[in-house]
Amino acid sequence: MKTLKFKTNIKCGGCIAAVTSHLNAAETVSTRPVDTANPNKILTLEGENLSEAVVIEKVKTAGYTIEMVEG
């Protein structure tokens, strides 16, 4: 399973719900925890055949900022 981490501006449960609906369209995503306590609001995705470009496009379409982070 592949894991990707992103810095976002996702702040609350409502934000997570909005992004989740867009990420659900990417069938390869299996988990979407967001560390809202972290100042960088780290979104961690796990799944098979994850595409960084697809994830970024889905989150931006939902109206949030996103950038890849290492680790």
Image (cartoon, rainbow, N blue to C red):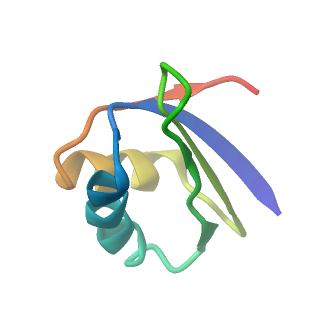
Q: Is residue 33 above or below residue 11?
A: below
Q: Quadrant of residue 60?
A: top left
* Left or right: 42 as drawn, with respect to 70: left
* Left or right: 59 as drawn, with respect to 54: left
Q: For the point 44% across and 46% down, which residue is it?
A: 53
Residue 48: x %, y % from top left? 72, 69
In the rendered view of the protein, which quadrant contains the C terminus?
top right
Q: For the point 24% across and 40% down, which residue is it?
A: 64
Pick the front one: 55 or 6: 6
Residue 47: x %, y % from top left? 69, 67
Pick the front one: 39 or 3: 39
Q: How many marks?
A: 0
* Left or right: 52 as drawn, with respect to 25: right
Q: For the point 37% across and 78% down, which residue is it?
A: 25
* Left or right: 16 as drawn, with respect to 2: left
Q: Is residue 54 above or below residue 23?
A: above
Residue 37: x %, y % from top left? 53, 31
Pick the front one: 2 or 18: 18
What residue occupies the far top of the structure in this picture? 39
Q: Quadrant of residue 26?
A: bottom left
Q: Quadrant of residue 5?
A: top right
Q: Is residue 26 above or below residue 1?
A: below
Q: For the point 28% across and 52% down, which residue is it?
A: 15
In the rendered view of the protein, which quadrant contains the N terminus?
bottom right
